[in-house]
């Protein structure tokens, strides 16, 4: 589960500055890390953001995957969790996104454009009542 960004309002700013500095150094041996307690290569890292939007009919997951080619993205879903695996020249991304409700993974559609991945699922139908005779 993703933490509430309001807990530390300057985290996004420091991540963006860190990302830009690392990009300027173009993969030099020394990476700038404002938060030495975190591991830069864990999960999607600092330059990726995942949003989940939910309506009565569908669940939409939007993820930033900068620098990743479409052919290097793999998606899997079990109805409750979406697993996104992707790789770029400098980084390996692996993220498990817990979905807010059960979805029908067989209805999923995904698009990838300009570094933005969007996956849309239909909500799974609720169980029907069973009458006892």
Image: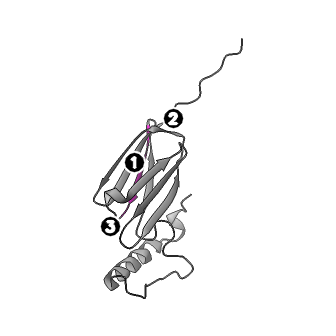
Q: Which residues fall within the magenta stretch?
A: 58-65
Q: What residue is disc 2 on?
A: 124
| Quadrant of the snapshot with the N terminus | bottom right
In the image, residue 62 lies in the stretch drawn in magenta: yes
Using the numbered discs, state the Cα–Cα distance from disc 3 to disc 1 in whole angstroms.
18 Å
Q: Residue drawn at (54%, 68%), measured in percent from left and top? A: 7
Query: Please, what secondary structure does the residue beneath circle 3 have?
Result: loop
| Labels 1 & 2 near each other (Cβ < 8 A) | no
Using the numbered discs, state the Cα–Cα distance from disc 3 to disc 2 in whole angstroms.
33 Å
Q: Earlier in the sequence, mark 1 or mark 2?
A: 1
Q: What residue is disc 3 on?
A: 67
Q: Residue drawn at (41%, 61%), measured in percent from left and top? A: 86
Q: What residue is disc 1 on?
A: 119
Q: Nearer the viewer, mark 3 or mark 1?
A: 3
Mostly what secondary structure, the magenta segment? strand
Percent position (x, y) of residue 58?
A: 43, 39
């Amino acid at each position: 589960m993703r933490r509430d960004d309001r807990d530390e309002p300057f985290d996004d700013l420091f991540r963006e500055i860190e990302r830009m500095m690392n990009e300027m150094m173009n993969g030099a041996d020394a990476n700038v890390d404002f938060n030495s307690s975190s591991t830069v290569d864990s999960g999607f890292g600092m330059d990726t953001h995942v949003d989940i939007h939910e309506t009565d009919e569908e669940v939409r997951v939007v993820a930033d995957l900068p620098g990743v080619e479409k052919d290097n993205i793999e998606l899997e879903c079990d109805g409750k969790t979406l697993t996104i695996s992707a790789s770029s020249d400098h980084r390996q991304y692996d993220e498990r996104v817990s979905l807010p409700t059960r979805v029908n993974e067989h209805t999923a559609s995904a698009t990838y454009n300009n570094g933005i991945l969007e996956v849309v699922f239909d909500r799974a139908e609720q169980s029907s009542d069973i009458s006892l005779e």
